[in-house]
Amino acid sequence: MNDPIASTELVAILPSGEKKRIRIEIGTPCARDAGDAACSVAMAGLYDNLHDAIGVDTFQALALAVSFVRQTLRGLTNKGWRITLPDDDDEGDSAGDNDGDLPGDDEDSDFDFDKAWGDRENGTGSSRRREK
């Protein structure tokens, strides 16, 4: 992906205990000749060659790309996977290392989807709104 506008790194822990590093990237949404827009999504460590998110305009394409990432990760947790934030002191470990030093060993480090992307049912998230 060329010039992602957003990226993050997470650790996925499979039900078997295997750990995988995931690098998520969202590309710049762009208008297409068909009159719609596309936004690229990459989830290195999980999937190769994902299709672009397609929307009626660049805003919707971007929103759909972020929603796809959230739904994909949520689907994995529903299957028993854990998604965690990497520990700063473990940056040098590689995916699948499973030596006990990979991020995600702390039971309290599970990724909080609702804080990161908002709680869809309650319409809340971590974004702050300015009071008028």
Image: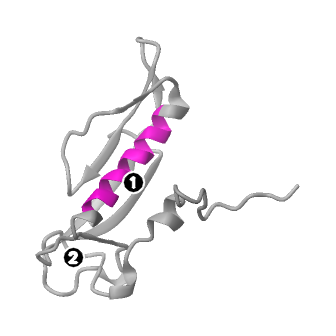
Q: Is residue 37 left or right of residue 73?
A: right
The amino acid type found where label 1 is placed reads Arg
Query: Reading the chain from its start, which is encountered first: label 2 or label 1?
Result: 1
Quick check: is 64 in the magenta stretch?
yes
Q: Residue at x 30, y 52 (%)?
A: 72
Q: Is residue 70 above or below residue 39?
A: below
Residue 73 spot, x, y in % from top left: 32, 58
Image: magenta residue range:
61-76
Q: Nearer the viewer, residue 57 or 1?
A: 57
Q: Quadrant of residue 40?
A: top left
* Residue at image mark 1: 70
Question: Circle 2 — which element?
Answer: loop
Query: Which is more foreground, mark 2 or mark 1?
Result: 1
The amino acid type found where label 2 is placed reads Asp
Residue 57 spot, x, y in % from top left: 52, 25
Q: Nearer the viewer, residue 26 or 111?
A: 111
* Residue at image mark 2: 93
Q: Is residue 6 above or below residue 52?
A: below
